[in-house]
């Protein structure tokens, strides 16, 4: 076997583990749509926001799991990174949905709208950002 043929074969063998999931699933939208989806919301609360107000928001967010189908997990926490890169965003809320369809049904759900109304009524969120991603892609 020539040296260049051996290198080409080695390259193919090394890349097969990376390619095989793509070959098996391709860009098959049905496969992608069935992956669990993480929904991460991070809040920057206004100065003067009380711990009780934050607790109220956190509890209301947590309760959505019992009120909206398709939510399989909920976690929350407070930033404690020593890097100082959080830009004032302090509280993280993470939901896991069964799939993208469950996440898409959550967004216009009346209970989600009520949660948004609570946030508006309290008027304590200075800023927020949201990141969603399919797990395993």
Image (cartoon, grey):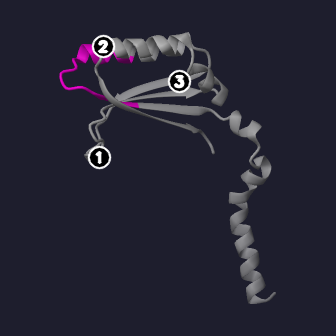
Please tell me how many numbered marks the rendered image carries: 3
Picture layout, residue 75 above or below residue 136: above
User: What's the CA distance linking mark 1 and mark 3?
Assistant: 27 Å
- Which residue corresponds to mark 3? 73
In the figure, residue 102 lies in which quadrant? top right
Element on which disc 2 rests: helix
User: What's the CA distance linking mark 3 and mark 2?
Assistant: 25 Å
Q: Is residue 49 magenta?
A: yes
Residue at the image position 36 percent from the left and 16 percent from the top: 119
Query: In the figure, is residue 88 to the left or right of 131?
Result: left
Binning the other alpha carbons within 10 Å of mark 1 as few (below 14), some (14 to 19) or many (20 upward) gives: few
105 or 52, nearer to the observer = 105
Picture layout, residue 133 above or below residue 92: below
Residue 47: image location, x then y, percent: 19, 26
Q: Which residues are magenta?
A: 42-58
The first of marks 2 and 1 along the sequence is 1
Element on which disc 3 rests: strand
Residue at the image position 26 percent from the left and 37 percent from the top: 88
Residue lying furthest right in this view?
1
- Look at discs 1 and 3 and give the one toward the viewer: 1
- Which residue corresponds to mark 1? 85
Picture layout, residue 106 above or below residue 99: above
The C terminus lies in quadrant = top right
Query: In the figure, is residue 131 to the left or right of 54?
Result: right
Query: In the figure, is residue 99 to the left or right of 121?
Result: right
Residue 122: mark in rendering: 2
């Amino acid at each position: 076997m020539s040296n260049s043929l051996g290198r080409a074969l080695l390259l193919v063998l090394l890349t097969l583990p990376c390619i095989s999931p793509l070959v098996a699933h391709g860009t098959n939208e049905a496969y992608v749509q069935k992956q669990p989806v993480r929904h991460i919301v991070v809040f920057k609360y206004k100065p003067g926001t009380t711990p009780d107000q934050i607790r109220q928001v956190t509890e209301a967010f947590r309760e959505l799991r019992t009120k909206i189908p398709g939510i399989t997990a909920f976690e929350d926490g407070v930033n404690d990174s020593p890097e100082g890169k959080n830009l004032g965003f302090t509280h993280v809320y993470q939901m896991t949905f069964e799939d993208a369809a469950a996440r898409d049904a959550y967004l216009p759900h009346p209970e989600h709208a009520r949660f948004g109304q609570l946030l508006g009524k309290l008027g304590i969120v200075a800023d927020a950002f949201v990141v969603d991603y399919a797990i395993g892609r």
